[in-house]
Image (cartoon, grey):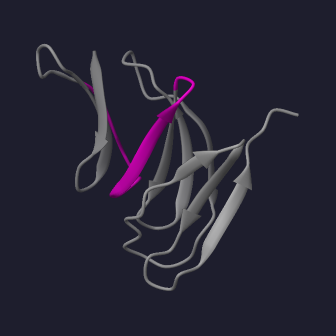
Amino acid sequence: GYLYGFDDKSLACLDLKTGETKWSEGGLGKGSLILSDGKLICLSDRGELVLVKADPSGYNEISRTQVLGGKNLWTQPVLSGGMIYARNNAKGDAVAVNVSPS
């Protein structure tokens, strides 16, 4: 299996068996993520919502959009009923993004 996660400046994929880094992508900063339907739903510490294919062969960004203002956002995105919910931990701002297939 594979582990996906953030360090101080990048999102990375690690092989759980060997510990080998399969790929690492900078430019996201720190963040949090959840996995759904083979995709990583990432919320960066700068309020960017980034959708990435969960694929150990390489980083494949599907979409990226700024959904919240501020910095040091370390809250977890939530997926429920075709909506992604995210909030700003400092100001209490929240956003709901519809990701249901049309």
Q: Position of residue 64 (x, y in %)?
A: 61, 49
Q: Quadrant of residue 63?
A: top right
Q: Position of residue 5 (x, y in %)?
A: 30, 40
Report the side of 31 relative to 9 (left or right). Answer: right
Q: What residue range appears in magenta?
A: 22-38
Q: Quadrant of residue 68?
A: bottom right
Q: Position of residue 35 (x, y in %)?
A: 47, 34
Q: Quadrant of the N terminus?
A: top left
The verdict on residue 26 being magenta is yes
Q: Is residue 60 above or below residue 93?
A: above
Please give the name of the residue rendered at 49% of the width and 79% of the height, measured from the top-left corner: 70
Q: Residue placed farthest to the front in the image?
A: 81
The verdict on residue 25 being magenta is yes
78 or 32, nearer to the observer: 78
Q: Is residue 80 above or below residue 40?
A: below
9 or 102, nearer to the observer: 102
Q: Quadrant of the C terminus?
A: top right
Q: Residue placed farthest to the right in the image?
A: 102
Please give the name of the residue rendered at 38% of the width and 52% of the height, measured from the top-left corner: 32
Report the side of 27 relative to 102 (left or right). Answer: left
Q: Residue placed farthest to the bottom in the image?
A: 91
Majority SS type along the magenta span: strand
Q: Is residue 64 above or below residue 53?
A: below
Q: Position of residue 53 (x, y in %)?
A: 52, 27
Please give the name of the residue rendered at 59% of the width and 79% of the height, measured from the top-left corner: 93
Picture mark count: 0
Please give the name of the residue rendered at 28% of the width and 54% of the height, measured from the top-left corner: 9
Q: Is residue 8 above or below residue 36?
A: below
